[in-house]
Amino acid sequence: MPLSPDQRKEIEDLRAQTQPTLRATVPGMEAHLYKAHEVLDHGFIRVIDYMGDDSAITQAARVSYGKGTKSVQNDEGLIRYLMRHWHSTPFEMCEIKLHVKLPVFVARQWIRHRTANVNEYSARYSILDREFYIPAADDLAAQSVVNNQGRGESLSGEEAERVLRYLRDDATRAYDHYEEMISQDDQQGLARELARMNLPANIYTQWYWKVDLHNLFHFLRLRADAHAQYEIRVYADAICEVVKDWVPAAYGAFEDYRLGGAQLSGKAVECVKRMIAGEKVTQETSGMSKGEWREFEGVIG
């Protein structure tokens, strides 16, 4: 269960409080505040705070225009213009703070995005809960034979059961030893900062993660992509659902130009022009490598 009864009570108490404010608020985000959106078997994301909305983006952009520059009258049109032309600073005017509970191995991937402020649960001071990520049988897959960092065909039958048994048994055994090492009933007990080294990478940790919208979009562009690892992609998908309700115009532009769009190299653009002109273009005549050509074919269908 991702939330304990005490955590649920805390959330209910927080949501029962109301504060008058003059700052910009978004009804969709107010509905998300403090609520836990469950992810994986024990994880979640929660919105703890946010700043700004779609109008904060256009306000910042129009300040930067100054007098005498070309203006875009429609707010949504301006946001799409900014997204289309990679004008990032107006999107930095919005920020969000999330409380995330996630497996350690997912956290190690996530932390590679170094443009956020992070404060993680400390296993030096506190004892980690006995909660591990155990994949559903359908999510177990063999190593891909064409992608060194991806999955191939799903495991099935006895092999899947064997892997799940190893994951459960090894995690349980490691945590049992962790508890024994820090126990002080009849012995000195090992320091928590040392005992934690024995814990598996699928144990859950938690952190507060604060990021501006520009860098959040960069995170989502990579982690909500179909090629991202499943265990981090489901977190990105959950965040996408929240961002839709926070900045709908900005998210719509992001979805169109980043998630659903494609960036073409100069060679690829030239190939498209040649194809439109009726010329038959092949990998050999394109000037692209085999890998580039394969990706280009994936874009043009």
Image (cartoon, helix red, strand yellow):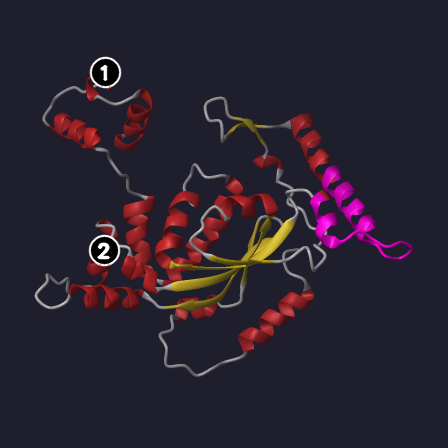
Q: CA distance from mark 2 to mark 1?
A: 37 Å
Residue at image point 10% right, 62% down: 69
Crowdedness near tag 1: few (<14), some (14–19) or many (≥20) residues, C-alpha within 10 Å: few
Is the residue 166 above or below the residue 239 in the image? above
Q: Which residues are magenta?
A: 169-197
Q: Is residue 171 visible?
A: yes
- Looking at the rendering, in which quadrant would you find the N terminus? bottom right
Q: For mark 2, what is the residue? A: 82
Asked whether residue 183 is drawn in magenta, I would say yes
In the image, 225 versus 59, the foreground residue is 59
**Which tag, 2 or 1, sits closer to the chain's start?**
2
Q: Is residue 249 visible?
A: no
Q: For mark 1, what is the residue? A: 284
Left or right: where 213 falls relative to 71: right
- Please state the horizontal and vertical placement of residue 22, each as a whole percent of the image: 37, 81
Task: Residue 4: name its quadrant.
Answer: bottom right
Left or right: where 2 falls relative to 110: right
Residue at image point 54% right, 26% down: 143
Left or right: where 61 falls relative to 201: left
Residue most toward the left? 68
As shown in the figure, which amino acid type bears the numbered disc 2?
A: Leu
- Looking at the rendering, in which quadrant would you find the C terminus? top left
Do the numbered discs 2 and 1 sit on residues whose CB atoms are within 8 Å? no
Residue at image point 49% right, 68% down: 33
As shown in the figure, which amino acid type bears the numbered disc 1?
A: Glu
Dominant SS of magenta comes to: helix
- Please state the horizontal and vertical placement of residue 124, each as a whole percent of the image: 69, 56
